[in-house]
Image: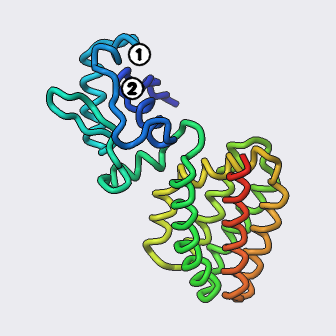
């Protein structure tokens, strides 16, 4: 077996991640002015060329505006961003999402998962429901947060497959980092046994073709997860 070389993130990538995460968590807000390039280079102990490259990348991602002779300012990425910006937000790994963004994520989940569990309960795709059952078994056997988070994603991805809608599995795949992160945060307060029971009840309702109960249980699961994070 041949192993691939390990590549460390570049200084520019680390700079982009640090500033991006500060914006996503609300430490930096729209309109805030970033320090001058020279000051940033001093604070971060990198060259000005690294600062310049990083700021240009952040502007491409719609996290900042660079105004000639004025400096760099935090942008409102919610209104100005695009799909690439969304991917950066989903891949975020720097503490908790700010409350308004977290609420938006859960509102998105309510709408998307309602459609997924509705179709899954109606169409009864046995192979995909079997995958969901296997994910539940992964929950019970998980020994660390990585395995727990992976089981969470596998469960909802299996339900998306069970919907037999060709787009939903792609959407859930696109939001994989988000599902992993939310599952990690929920597991920190020891709510794992409750999540297992809720997912088990949800899968049972879907397998029985009970659309209303499945939707109600999924809504309750999402709302519980959101309240749990709001207490963190």
Left/right placement of residue 69 relative to residue 213 reads: left
Residue 220: x and y in percent read 72, 72
Q: Nearest the camera: 40 or 88?
A: 40
Image quarter of residue 40: top left
Q: Position of residue 111 (x, y in %)?
A: 53, 74
Gap in angstroms between the C-alphas marked 2 and 1: 8 Å
- Can you tell which quarter of the image residue 200 is in? bottom right
Is 216 in front, or is 168? 216
Instruction: Determine the secondary structure under disc 2.
Output: helix
- Say left or right for 188 vs 157: right
As drawn, the label of residue 44 is 1
Label 2 with label 1: CB-CB less than 8 Å? yes
Q: 115 left or right of 59?
A: right
Read off the residue under disc 2: 15
Q: Residues within 10 Å of mark 1 (few under 14, many from 20)?
A: few
Please give left or right for residue 82 compared with residue 20 in the image.
left
Q: Is residue 127 above or below residue 56?
A: below
Extreme left residue here?
Answer: 68
Residue 223 image offset from top left, x and y in percent: 68, 66
Q: Residue at x 48, y 71 (%)?
A: 168
Using the image, determine if residue 14 lies above or below residue 215. above
Nearer to me, 119 or 87 = 87
- Which residue does the image show at 25% across and 26% down from the upper left? 53
Rendering colour mode: rainbow
Marked residue nearer the N-terminal end (2 or 1): 2
The kind of secondary structure element at disc 1 is helix
Question: Foreground: 198 or 136?
Answer: 198
Q: How many marks?
A: 2
Q: Position of residue 29 (x, y in %)?
A: 42, 41
Q: Which mark is residue 88?
A: none
For image coordinates 61% across by 71% down, the residue present is 159
* Above or below: residue 180 compared with residue 55: below
């Amino acid at each position: 077996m041949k192993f691939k070389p390990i590549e460390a993130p570049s200084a520019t990538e680390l700079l982009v991640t640090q500033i991006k995460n500060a914006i996503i968590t609300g430490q930096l807000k729209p309109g805030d002015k970033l320090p001058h390039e020279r000051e940033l280079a001093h604070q971060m102990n990198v060259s000005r060329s690294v600062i310049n490259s990083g700021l240009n990348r952040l502007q491409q991602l719609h996290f900042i505006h660079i105004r000639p002779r004025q400096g760099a300012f935090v942008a409102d990425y919610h209104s100005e961003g695009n799909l690439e910006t969304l991917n950066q937000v989903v891949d975020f790994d720097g503490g908790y999402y700010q409350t308004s963004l977290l609420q938006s994520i859960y509102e998105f989940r309510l709408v998307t998962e309602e459609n997924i569990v509705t179709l899954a309960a109606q169409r009864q795709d046995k192979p995909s429901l079997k995958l969901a059952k296997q994910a539940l078994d992964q929950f019970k056997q998980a020994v660390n947060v990585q395995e727990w988070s992976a089981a969470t994603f596998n469960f909802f991805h299996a339900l998306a497959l069970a919907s037999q809608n060709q787009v939903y599995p792609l959407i859930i795949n696109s939001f994989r980092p988000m599902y992993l992160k939310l599952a990690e945060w929920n597991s920190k307060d020891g709510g794992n046994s409750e999540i297992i029971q809720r997912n088990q009840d949800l899968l049972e309702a879907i397998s029985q073709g009970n659309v209303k109960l499945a939707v109600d249980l999924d809504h309750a699961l999402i709302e519980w997860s959101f309240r749990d994070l709001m207490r963190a």
